[in-house]
Amino acid sequence: MLSKNNPQIDILSQMIYDKLVPDDHLLVKIDSIIDFSFVYDKVKDKYSSISGRSSKDPAMMVKIILLEYLYKLSDVEVAKRASTDVVFRWFLKLGIDDITPDDTTISHFRTKRIGKEDFENFFNEIVKMCIEKNIVKTKRYIIDSTDVSANTALPFGKKLIRDAYSKVIKEIDKFDENLAKQEKDSFEADIDKEYEKAEKVGANKHFEIALKHLADIYVKTYDELQNNEKYLDAYELCYDIADQHLNKKKDKIISIVDKDARAAHKSRGKVKVGYKDHIIVDEDSEIILASSQTPFNVGDEKKLDELINKVEDNFKIKPEEITADKVYGTTDNRAYLKDNKIVSNIAFYNSPAEKNEVYGIRDFVISEDLESVTCPYGVTTKDFTKTNVTEKTPARILFKFDKKYCTECPLRDSCIRKDKTGKHNLRFKIVEVPIRYDAVLHDLKRVETKDFDVAYRKRFKVERRFGTMVNHRGLRRNRYTGLDSSSVHIIMANFASNIVRMVNILCRPVPVAVKA
């Protein structure tokens, strides 16, 4: 049953708190501004109203988890601190003699009692408070993401598949020890044979051998695979790892501990592994309005419209402008902003010609009605065809220049690529224009304005939010594994960051007027 702490603190506890709890403490400021009773309504469906043991006060439990992110504490650390720290006990509305929840209770509340959706609701309640107190504006929002490292060791190649296969063998050992030993020895024997042939055996050979043995195991343990969920999970995990790596699939499992974590290149030669925290921030207040959590290999640009829509759906507010890094400047994103009458403050990458490559689309003059294209030499064409959307390519307009101009053009070498033999790949130029290039033309004008420069220089504010969460809210490395659990960690870091930001704004000292 849902239980609440007695709001009346005993006289002795109150006397101690009055003497020892400082008025300017962060937790005192939070308590004076935020009423956490909203938690009861958000979690009431998680508790029985007529039976069961009395639970720990859910508002108190949410506060305890908040304390973990305010002070970078684990479940064990926050449980110990709550039992000895006077300000913690006061913030949790506990008397001096009251028993505090242990780390097991905290963990159970976070993982069994409530879930990701509940934490998202708590986060939204704080944003609503910020809107009600007129902290959040609707002038300009900033979108960006940061990486959150996976909470696991990350073996690659040979070790990854060997660990995955060992996990299968361990599960087989639970129901058939002889078969487990037989399959383990057979696998190792096949690996040893490869090393007898050559000093170095590549990872692909390990994957091939694993798949071969998994096929044999499938036949021998078919009945067990239909009824043993843990064994099935281990088998499918091992099979997927081998299959994905052998077939060079983009979305590859990289850990047997955290199956949802992914790897991707953040920059040339720099691989990041884990998850991303995609956020949209109000530029004026730096309050995080919404977030999305994904594996690291999900592109930032895919989350722009989702974040804007999330804010509008949750809070019925929409920005006048959006600022984001260049990576968000896809044609689809620019078209989305244009169609929704949101000003785009997204810069462009340098054109190919600026990098001494063959002329790119921005080196051609494209009419606003997308009816004609003029090349760098001044030749205009209206000869075009439109293509339809396919699984691999978006809809495009293909402009074709007459070969009689291209053949004799002095800019030919800068306009048409050459093959390895030094010959031009094409006899004439074809310019591929996205079907919604009108939005790109619209934004190209915007980036030339002073207003754009002012807005784009404010992107540091979202970086400051990330810096604060990494350094003070534990965002850099995940506490948990799996996308759902990792999302809880990320949402709570955002939640704590918003609360502190809200308090700092509302508790700023009022400037004193100086008399002349």
Image: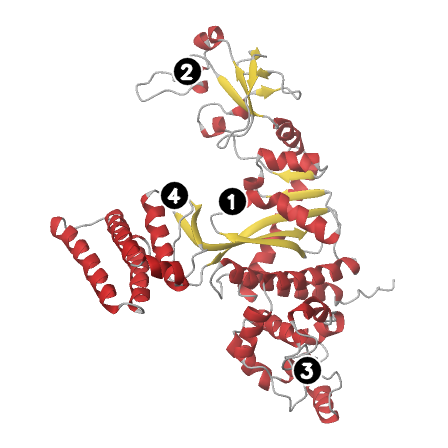
The local crowd at label 3, few if under 14, some if 14 to 19, many if 20 or more residues have their Cα within 10 Å, is many
Task: Kindly state the secondary structure of the residue where label 3 is placed.
Answer: helix
Q: Earlier in the sequence, mark 2 or mark 3?
A: 3
User: What is the CA distance from the residue labelled 2 to the residue labelled 1?
Assistant: 33 Å
| Residue in view at x 41 percent, y 50 percent | 271
Residue 250 in the image, given as x and y percentages of width and height = 41, 44
Q: What residue is shown with label 3?
A: 90
Asked whether residue 376 is in view, the answer is: no
Left or right, residue 488 beside residue 189: right
Q: Are marks 3 and 4 in contact (CB under 8 Å)?
A: no
| Label 2 – label 3 distance at C-alpha | 76 Å
Question: Which residue occupies 55% across, 59% down?
Answer: 487
Mark 4 lies on residue: 249
Precedes in sequence: disc 3 or disc 4: 3
Q: What kind of residue is marked 3?
A: Trp
Q: Which of the two labelled residues, at mark 4 and mark 2, occupies the earlier sequence position?
A: 4
Q: Which mark is residue 299?
A: 1
Q: Nearer the viewer, mark 1 or mark 3?
A: 1
